[in-house]
Amino acid sequence: YEIYQCDWSSDVCSSDFTQNKIANTEYKYNVGDRVFTDWTAKNNYPPMEILDKRLYGGSHSAFVRDPVTFKPVLDESGNKIREPERAGYLVKHEFTHPELGDVSHTYVLPEERFKGVIEPEPPYKTGGSV
């Protein structure tokens, strides 16, 4: 394994490195798949559409937090621990909210949040809380 000569201050090499990591990561879903989380299925909301494969977690992720105190968890050296890097997706979720009208959100979510591509019976719920 050889590292190509690179100006690491630029985004070009780090972007290439990330794309290579994404290409070598196993993903369960594909771009264009419509997937459900527990929340969308339970509340009969429309599925989320996968727009792109991403890495979730790692050096640029949120810190792991204590579920009771919500304070960052520290390692034995006193450094904050980050979420582990794993398969994730950029998704779009569109639905109609009774007060806000048409709503469209994009998120990056880890693969384990999705429960599958099986859709609940239409028509989907058009109201509820966001």
Image (cartoon, rainbow, N blue to C red):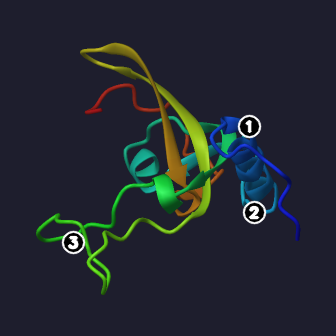
Label at residue 12 = 1
- Is 14 rendered above or below residue 101? below
- Is 75 rendered above or below residue 103? below
- Classify mark 3: residues with Cα within 10 Å, few (<14), some (14-19) or many (20+): few
For the point 24% across and 15% down, the residue is: 99
Which residue extends farthest bottom? 76
Distance Cα–Cα, label 2 vs label 3:
28 Å
Q: Secondary structure at mark 1?
A: helix
In this figure, which residue is indicated by the disc labeled 3?
66
Q: Nearer the viewer, residue 105 or 75?
A: 75
| Residue type, numbered disc 3 | Asp
- Classify mark 1: residues with Cα within 10 Å, few (<14), some (14-19) or many (20+): few
Label at residue 25 = 2
Please provide percent x and percent y for residue 91: 57, 38
Which is more N-terminal, label 3 or label 1?
1
Please provide percent x and percent y for residue 76: 30, 87
Q: Quadrant of the C terminus?
A: top left
